[in-house]
Amino acid sequence: MQAYNELYLALCGQLIRFSAAIVSSFHLAEEVISDVFITVWQKRHQLKHVENPVVYLYVTTKNLSLNTLQRNRRHLHESLELLDTAAFQIAPDAEKSMISAEVSQKIESAIRSLPPRCQLIFRLVKHDRLSYREVADLLDISVKTVDAQLSLAVKKVAQAVRFDLSGELVTSFLHLDS
Amino acid sequence: MDQEKLYTLLTREIANELTEAEAEELQQLLQQYPHASYIREIFMKPWQETGRPASTEQLSDMQARHLQRLHASDATPRVTTEGETPVVQLAKRRWWRAAGIAAGIALLIAVGWKFIPGRTTAPQPQKSLATAKGIRSQLLLPDGSRVWLNSGSKLNYPRSFAARGPRVVELEGEAFFEIATDANRPFRVQTKAFTILVLGTSFNVRAYPQEDSAVTSLVDGAIEVQLDKNGQQKVMLRPNEKLTIPSNLFTARDNEAAVTEEQRPAIHLYKQRLTQIRDSITSETAWVKNKLAFKHLELDKVSALLEQWYGVEISFRDQQKKQLYFTGVFETNNLDEVLEALASTGSFTYTKDEKGRIWIE
């Protein structure tokens, strides 16, 4: 039970955001994640063969979220095509990255301008530290697509920052580096 | 070119998917492009979630709620020495929970079953998305094309498009398409009225079976509207043009197989410019951006739009009011706001009866 509680605390935050993007409600998402962990608890003896518990939890979350959507008939779409991206948005920590709030904002809006699925892939890799293979399995796409989608996001951010970067900033940074 | 490579390598570094050779290449490129080191630095630092960050207290609250639910659902029978009622309640809840989990597992199995390789059946299985009145939806097709589906519409599309040959979807109602370019696989939209042949482009199709005409509006790119099965009659559209086709034409054409080219009656098609309402808002495509827009439109047609948009019924007590003309752009989920704005012109009043039907008088 100790391990189970730790697992819940470690992962519920990111799983809730993933679910909330699908069901577009944090309240519903909390219930979905609770259901996910209840399922895991009840099936704990059958789950020994599961190779990657994190991906297993993500996949279960995806399925139960879609299930909830269908039950509530809130939307009529039946897959991950319409995502509430606000739920899983991430941005650089301005202080730790030594960037101005302005640049941070530029990056945030660059990310937000990407297609929802691309944003999701970026978050899953960058923030939740999932591997290409894991994201590919979760979203039912190829590893190549994950790579391409992610580099789209990186390029977009890089361009946003580059256009915004004053020469001064670059020199000051290079200075710091040397 | 090097820049592209740089982004690709940076991407893989972020994802922790760099091979050794790639790592070396990245180092070299970073020396060439000093600005990239700055970007790299930003990416390598941990990012934080925007929006409501969960505090430790919230987390433990959540965990407490979860554990409560978990215990309530626990399948192991418990001995309660308290009265009868709690036992009954417990059993009831347990039954409900068990049903939910069973459904969940069934879904897992069902979904898992689909993913088993080699089970893909030969003819492309069709999927379908339908929207009720008052509901709009959006979807991404397997080829990366994006479709916005307006209310009361239906789109049939294959689960995956064939590697060769045209990508074909069927539409009933209204949809806006943004087609991913693929010169080898032209995109086709089939409606009861016509077939649209597309390369990469964005356009709107309105073909509701209950309306007396069907309209194709082109925003960007190039499309060809094919009016007959064998492609003898095609109309080419340019950006910002729309084509209106009377729908009775097609019911009539079904039994004209024997009619020769000369005898074919002249078809009245209307090619017009898109209706610009304000900068960047055209009434044909405003719905995609969740805006309801119309320009110099009879109240009769405006009310039909509102019926579809809000899923309500609107009738006229005074038939003459149908001929009033209105122009407007609305972005609201509140029908009353729209009606009040229109009625504030003083040209009509409206009431709602007990069934929710709106009467214009």
Image (cartoon, coloured by chain):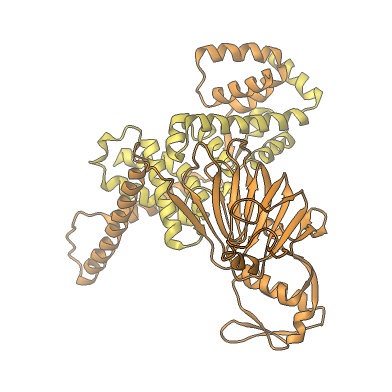
Residue A49 lies, in percent from the top left, at 26, 34
Task: Indicate the chain coloured yellow by its letter.
Answer: A
The C terminus of chain B lies in quadrant: bottom right
| Quarter where residue B312 is shown | bottom right
Residue B90 lies, in percent from the top left, at 25, 64
Left or right, B84 with respect to A156, comes to left
Which residue occupies 68% across, 49% down? B224
Which residue occupies 31% across, 47% down? B109
Viewer-nearest residue: B261 or B31: B261
Residue B264, relative to residue B187: is it above or below? below
Viewer-nearest residue: A2 or A117: A117
Viewer-nearest residue: B218 or B361: B218
Residue A60, relative to residue B337: is it above or below? above
| Quarter where residue B229 is shown | bottom right
> Is residue B348 visible in the rendered structure shown here?
yes
Residue A130 lies, in percent from the top left, at 46, 32
| Quarter where residue B24 is shown | top right
The N terminus of chain B lies in quadrant: top right
Query: Exactly how many numbered labels are in the figure?
Result: 0
Residue A93 lies, in percent from the top left, at 63, 34
Viewer-nearest residue: B177 or A39: B177
> Is residue B51 visible in the rendered structure shown here?
no
Chain B on-screen colour: orange
